[in-house]
Image: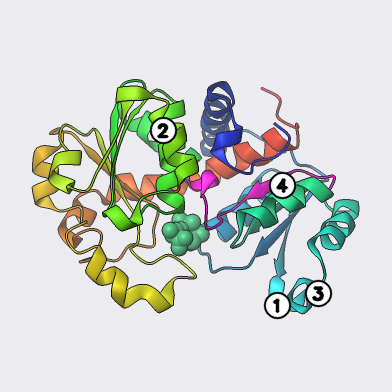
Amino acid sequence: MKHFLKLLDLSSEEIFELLDIAADLKYKQKNGIPHRYLEGKSVALIFQKASTRTRTSFEVGTYQLGGYGAFLNVNDMQIARGEPVQDTIRVLSRYFDCLMIRTFDQSYVEDLAKYGSIPIINGLTDFCHPTQVIADLLTIREYKGSLEGLKMCYIGDGNNMANSLTVGALKTGMKMSLVCPDDYRPPKEILDFAYGYGDKFEICSDPLKGAVDADVLVTDVWTSMGQEEESQKRMIAFEGYQINDAILSVAKKDAMVQHCLPAHRGEEITAEVFEAHANEIFDEAENRLHAHKAIMVAVTNTYRK
Ligand code: CP
Ligand code: NVA
């Protein structure tokens, strides 16, 4: 795997390989087994949006792998003063072995991969959040034993999380049910991909219908980073698109709940459901660390069993 830009680029085998590496690195970390696959390597970490989990798990993960993770404050860089992406990445390619970036446009991440000569990892764009979904799939597999045939139901905005979950779930043999208001469905590129999976994919605007018999319920914020000006409008559009007891009552009895965090209790999820499923949600957050380590060793081709 040369880059990690979006799950659409990865084969099912590559996704499963990442899950297996993440599970192995998690085992090694928990059991004190050295796994310094990034010894002597440096990873640049650029954030053009806020982050708690992604930033810290990449920093700590790089350290645990024996490498150096450099957080680059974009406001202190020449990027903020208009230095072109082509020049920035050609310079950083001379210093670093890998670059992770969180930004707005997917095209910026694709351009970094095009003009640079080091692996690029997408730490969230407006289009997708693929590192998160590797952690989600890892968590679901840990709880359920395998992914094949499980039904995932995502309720809420057809945003970056919905896009990556749809691709990740379908590519790993899960069924995907998307529940979004009509005006907030994922983009055509994602829907076209999903319709290719026939009856393994469904989309509707009724949460109680879409969640029937779900094994995994997932949601995300109604207002993503960069959409703050629309938040009032969104509060109205998403009313009712909430994971609550009524939704859980139509899902499978042992359904798990996932949320990438940060969560807004009383909006996309009730406080009661959040707390009842807190273990699953914080295991998911922990798995960001193991998933990110797997992605870094995969793209730098440094993993050895
Ligand atoms: N879920 C997630 O990406 O969290 P952060 O925004 O805190 O990185
Ligand atoms: N959809 C959210 C995810 C945050 C991790 C956002 O883009 O803000």
Along the line of sight, the residue nearer the viewer: 123 or 81? 81
Query: Mark 1: few, some, or many residues within 10 Å (few <14, many ≥20)?
Result: few
For the residues labelled 1 and 3, the Cα–Cα distance comes to 8 Å
Region in magenta: 116-132
Q: Residue at x 19, y 64 (%)?
A: 239
Residue beneath disc 4: 120
SS type, badge 1? helix
For marks 1 and 4 on the same chain, the one whose residue lies earlier in the sequence: 1
Residue beneath disc 2: 194
Residue beneath disc 3: 78
Residue beneath disc 1: 75
Badge 1 vs badge 4, beta-carbon distance below 8 Å = no
Badge 3 vs badge 2, beta-carbon distance below 8 Å = no
For the residues labelled 1 and 2, the Cα–Cα distance comes to 38 Å
Query: Quadrant location of residue 7?
Result: top right
- Magenta residues, dominant SS class: loop
Q: Nearer the viewer, mark 1 or mark 2?
A: 2
Along the line of sight, the residue nearer the viewer: 16 or 111? 111
Q: Residue at x 21, y 34 (%)?
A: 214
Amino acid on which the number 1 mark rests in the picture: Asn
Q: Is residue 24 among what the camera can see?
A: yes
For the residues labelled 2 and 4, the Cα–Cα distance comes to 25 Å
For the residues labelled 3 and 2, the Cα–Cα distance comes to 39 Å
Q: Describe residue 110's horizontal placement relative to residue 255 as left or right.
A: right
In the rendered image, the quadrant that contains the C terminus is top right
For marks 1 and 2 on the same chain, the one whose residue lies earlier in the sequence: 1
Q: Nearer the viewer, mark 2 or mark 4?
A: 2
> Does 73 appear above or below 194?
below
SS type, badge 2? helix
In the rendered image, the quadrant that contains the N terminus is top right
